[in-house]
C-alpha cells in the first residue's frame, strides 16, 4: 500500500491526526481504493494506466486540487499522456462532464463511450474512478481546511473520549419505513427505484468473486440494478463498499442522522433525486422528523433547524460546489456550533463520499418513480 495520500499532502497537525486516528478504517479503505484504481496491472479492464491517471488528474484539476493531480502523476511515475484518439476524446469528454456537472452526463454520454469501444466493465470502472477522484479531492480539501482551522486559532485538539455504548447496528435497509413522504421541487422522500442504462450482471452466471461481493455489499444487492451493474468490477465494488460503510456507519463522532443531512444536501445540490430520496428516508428513520429535509429540498443553502444543522449544510454545500476554495472559514461555523474535530471530519467524509455516490447514480442509470 502507498503512503496515506491525504497525510502526505496536508501539513501534520495534532488535532487532525487525533481525529483521523479514530477513522482509520475509512482512511485505509480510501487508500486501498486509490491503490486499486491506479495500479499498473488492474485486471479485467482495457483502460490503460495512462488513461486512468489522465482521468484522475483531470478530476483533481477541475476540482481545484492541483497537488492531488500532481500526486496521481507522480505515483504512476508520470506515464505518457493518452494518445488523442476518438476513444480518449470520448473518455475525456465524459470525465469533464461528470467531474463538473454530474447531472449533465446522461445516457447519451454513455453511448458515446460504447461507440468509442469501451465495454460495460470499462465504463463502470471509468465512472468509479471519476467518482473516487471527486471524493478524494473533497476529502483533501476538507482535511486541509480542518488543519488550517486549528492553525488559525480554533479550539485546541480534543482527546478522544471513551466510546459510549451503542445500540446493535441495524442496516438502514432493514429499518422501518418512514411516514408520509415529502414531495418538493422535484425531490421526494418516497421510495424510488433505479434502472441501469447498461446491461447488469445476471446473478445466475456470476463468478464466485461477484457472488461474494454482492452478498457483502447490501442486503438487497441481488435485486438491485445498481449493485448488479457495479459488480462488473467486483474488486472495485468491494473496496467502495468498505469505504462507504466505514464513513456512514462508523461508531461515535457525528451522529448518523447528521451525516444524512450532509449526504442529502450534497445530493440536492448535485441533482441526484434518487440519492436524495434514500438519505432523506434515512434521516427520518433515525431522527423521527423530516423538517430539515423539507428545508434541504426547498433551499439547501439556508437549510437547518439549528446552528449545528446549518453549519453541516453549509460545509457540505461548499465542499460540493468548490472544493478547491474550501478554507478554515467554511468549517468555523461547525466548531462554533460545538462540533468536535472528529465530528467535523465525519462531516467532511460524508459530504465527500456523496460526490462519488451521486456521480454513479446520475450517470449509470436513472431514478424510477412509483
Image (cartoon, rainbow, N blue to C red):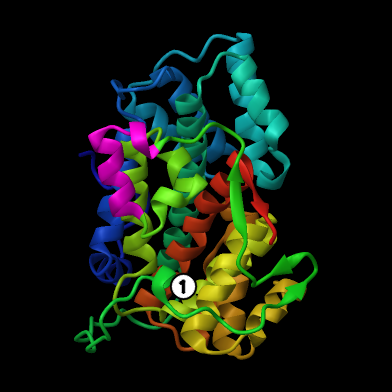
> Considering only vertical position in the picture, is 24 above or below 209?
below
Looking at the image, which residue is at 51% across and 14% down? 82
Secondary structure that dominates the magenta span: helix
Residue farthest along the front direction in this orientation:
204
For the question of whether residue 318 can be seen, the reply is: no
Looking at the image, which residue is at 62% across and 72% down? 314
Q: Quadrant of residue 202?
A: top left
Q: How many marks?
A: 1
> Considering only vertical position in the picture, is 309 above or below 232?
below
| Quadrant showing the N terminus | top left
Looking at the image, which residue is at 36% across and 70% down? 171
For the question of whether residue 59 can be seen, the reply is: yes
Please name whichever residue, 76 or 132, is drawn nearer the observer in this view of the structure.
Answer: 132
Q: Position of residue 190 (x, y in %)?
A: 64, 71
Q: Position of residue 49 (x, y in %)?
A: 39, 20
Q: Along the horizontal axis of the image, is 242 left or right of 92?
A: left
Q: Position of residue 20 (x, y in %)?
A: 29, 65
Looking at the image, which residue is at 40% across and 79% down? 254
> Considering only vertical position in the picture, is 27 above or below 211?
below
| SS under mark 1 | loop
Which residue was labeled with disc 1?
A: 152
Q: What segment carries the magenta color?
A: 203-217
> Considering only vertical position in the picture, is 22 above or below 160?
above
Please name whichever residue, 315 or 98, is drawn nearer the observer in this view of the structure.
Answer: 98
Q: Position of residue 43 (x, y in %)?
A: 30, 23
Q: Along the horizontal axis of the image, is 346 left or right of 333?
A: left
Q: Is residue 211 magenta?
A: yes
Q: Is residue 52 magenta?
A: no
Amino acid at each position: 500500500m502507498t503512503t496515506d495520500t491525504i497525510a502526505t499532502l496536508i501539513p501534520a497537525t495534532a488535532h487532525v491526526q487525533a481525529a483521523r486516528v479514530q477513522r482509520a478504517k475509512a482512511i485505509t479503505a480510501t487508500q486501498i481504493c486509490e491503490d486499486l484504481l491506479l495500479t499498473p496491472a488492474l485486471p479485467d479492464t482495457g483502460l490503460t494506466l495512462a488513461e486512468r491517471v489522465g482521468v484522475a488528474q483531470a478530476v483533481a484539476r477541475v476540482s481545484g486540487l492541483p497537488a492531488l493531480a500532481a500526486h496521481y502523476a507522480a505515483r504512476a511515475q508520470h506515464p505518457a499522456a493518452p494518445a488523442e484518439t476518438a476513444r480518449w476524446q470520448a473518455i475525456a469528454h465524459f470525465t469533464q462532464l461528470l467531474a463538473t456537472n454530474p447531472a449533465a452526463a446522461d445516457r447519451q454520454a454513455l453511448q458515446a463511450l460504447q461507440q468509442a469501444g469501451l465495454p460495460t466493465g470499462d465504463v463502470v470502472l471509468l465512472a468509479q474512478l471519476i467518482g473516487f477522484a471527486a471524493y478524494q479531492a473533497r476529502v483533501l480539501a476538507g482535511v486541509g481546511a480542518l488543519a488550517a482551522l486549528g492553525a488559525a486559532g480554533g479550539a485546541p485538539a480534543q482527546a478522544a473520549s471513551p466510546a459510549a455504548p451503542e445500540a446493535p447496528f441495524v442496516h438502514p435497509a432493514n429499518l422501518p419505513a418512514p411516514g408520509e413522504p415529502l414531495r418538493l421541487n422535484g425531490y421526494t422522500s418516497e421510495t424510488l427505484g433505479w434502472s441501469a442504462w447498461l446491461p447488469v450482471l445476471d446473478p445466475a452466471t456470476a463468478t464466485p468473486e461477484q457472488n461474494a461481493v454482492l452478498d457483502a455489499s447490501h442486503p438487497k444487492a441481488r435485486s438491485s440494478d445498481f449493485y448488479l451493474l457495479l459488480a462488473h468490477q467486483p474488486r472495485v465494488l468491494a473496496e467502495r463498499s468498505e469505504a462507504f460503510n466505514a464513513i456512514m456507519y462508523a461508531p461515535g463522532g457525528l451522529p448518523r442522522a447528521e451525516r444524512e443531512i450532509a449526504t442529502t444536501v450534497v445530493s440536492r445540490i448535485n441533482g441526484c433525486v434518487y440519492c436524495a430520496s434514500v438519505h432523506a428516508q434515512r434521516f427520518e428513520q433515525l431522527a423521527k422528523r423530516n423538517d430539515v429535509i423539507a428545508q434541504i429540498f426547498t433551499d439547501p443553502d439556508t437549510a437547518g433547524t439549528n446552528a449545528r444543522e446549518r453549519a453541516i449544510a453549509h460545509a457540505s454545500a461548499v465542499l460540493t460546489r468548490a472544493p478547491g476554495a474550501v478554507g478554515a472559514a467554511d468549517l468555523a461555523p461547525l466548531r462554533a456550533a460545538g462540533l468536535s474535530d472528529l465530528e467535523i471530519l465525519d462531516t467532511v467524509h460524508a459530504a465527500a463520499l456523496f460526490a462519488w455516490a451521486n456521480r454513479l447514480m446520475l450517470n449509470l442509470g436513472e431514478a424510477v418513480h412509483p
